Image: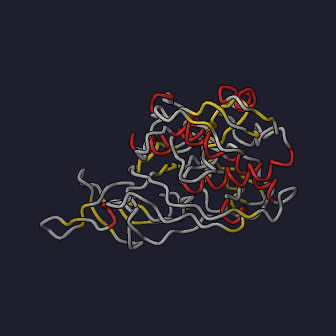
């Protein structure tokens, strides 16, 4: 983040590396998060974290996909083929393999009757999900995401060639060739990212905002069902400094305005540090980087270092998600 500081008439530009935190919440016994609110797509976009991606370590095998996770005998690929066929799909009664149907690819409008011509697309590709926060998920959560048929916006039956062109690109680099579907696609993308609490990078968020304030203005999206997130919070080392040009001369005014994020009320998705244990001397034992309450509380980590519960880092920069966490005082 850049700050423009005016001193004796000279403008000094200071670049600060901001630590980011990717979160896959620990959600307790039920293993679900509150339903993502529907409504204005632009309003939902404002709740999504904006941070640099973590493009290391991805392997497709980390997402166990095309599995029967609901126990009905049909894997998720066949379930989507059955769901998206505009006529009743023909299904092998023994293997549950879909052998024929009628599909219209929403990405390009092409029609097919042979399922071998169809790819089942993860609207937010597995690698994109990994880079945006799924790297911190448990294997169970990644499996749930890869086979998510509980919300039809996660998976779509599309033309194989077009899906290969899309690959793992986000909307800043790829949009469906069928222009009449672009706004629906953007709404689905926002819904999936919000539902699974995945972040966006600046170019992705900016492109989507531009569309939602122009050709897709007024777009609304339906509320989503609960996503089975079952991970833990992981703190990421400081990211590469962001050096977007500034246009404001105001003293200590951020040159980059991050999207407004909604501060979530404490709930079952907080980490154990929300209610810190105490040592025999009565001093709270805390977990550095974990969410906390109330703001201003103090404690000591296992290392013996003192920490404070704050919504800003040590440099005074607010955390993007608006939540307080334990940091060194």
Label total for image: 0
In the picture as drawn, the residue positioned furthest to the left comes out as: 280
Q: Nearer the viewer, residue 305 or 138?
A: 138
Q: Residue at x 46, y 28 (%)?
A: 61
Residue 73 can be seen in this image? yes
Residue 136 can be seen in this image? no
* Quarter of the rendering occupied by the C terminus: bottom left
Q: Position of residue 88 (x, y in %)?
A: 66, 44
Q: Nearer the viewer, residue 270 or 252?
A: 270
Q: Residue at x 61, y 42 (%)?
A: 82
Is 184 left, or right, of 236 in this rendering? right
In this rendering, the answer to whether 10 lies above or below 95 is below
Q: Residue at x 65, y 50 (%)?
A: 14
Is 20 left, or right, of 171 in this rendering? left
Q: Position of residue 98 (x, y in %)?
A: 58, 34
Q: Quadrant of residue 139?
A: top left
Q: How is the image coloured?
A: secondary structure
Q: Position of residue 62 (x, y in %)?
A: 45, 32
């Amino acid at each position: 983040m850049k700050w423009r500081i005016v001193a004796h008439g000279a403008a000094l530009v200071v670049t600060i590396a901001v630590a980011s935190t990717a979160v896959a919440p620990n959600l307790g016994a039920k293993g679900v998060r509150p339903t993502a609110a529907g409504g204005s797509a632009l309003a939902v976009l404002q709740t999504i974290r904006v941070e640099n991606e973590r493009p290391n370590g991805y392997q497709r095998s980390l997402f166990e996909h095309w599995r029967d996770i609901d126990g009905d005998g049909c894997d998720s690929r066949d379930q989507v083929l059955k769901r998206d066929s505009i006529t009743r799909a023909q299904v092998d009664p023994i293997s549950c393999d879909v052998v024929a149907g009628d599909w219209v690819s929403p990405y390009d409008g092409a029609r097919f009757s042979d399922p071998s011509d169809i790819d089942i697309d993860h609207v937010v590709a597995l690698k994109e999900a990994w880079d945006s926060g799924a790297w911190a998920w448990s294997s169970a959560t990644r499996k749930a995401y890869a086979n998510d048929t509980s919300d039809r916006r996660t998976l779509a039956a599309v033309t194989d060639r077009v899906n290969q062109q899309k690959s793992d690109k986000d909307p800043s680099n790829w949009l469906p060739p069928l222009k009449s579907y672009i706004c629906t696609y953007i709404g689905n993308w926002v819904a999936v990212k919000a539902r699974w609490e995945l972040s966006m990078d600046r170019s992705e968020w900016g492109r989507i905002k531009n569309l939602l304030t122009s050709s897709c203005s007024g777009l609304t999206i339906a509320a989503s069902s609960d996503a089975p997130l079952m991970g833990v919070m992981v703190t990421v080392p400081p990211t590469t400094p962001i050096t977007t040009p500034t246009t404001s001369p105001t003293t200590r005014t951020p040159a980059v305005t991050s999207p407004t994020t909604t501060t979530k009320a404490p709930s079952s998705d907080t980490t154990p540090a929300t209610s810190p244990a105490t040592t025999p001397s009565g001093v709270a034992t805390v977990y550095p980087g974990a969410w906390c309450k109330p703001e201003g509380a103090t404690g000591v980590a296992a290392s013996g270092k003192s920490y404070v519960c704050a919504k800003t880092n040590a440099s005074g920069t607010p955390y993007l998600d608006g939540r307080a966490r334990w940091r060194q005082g």
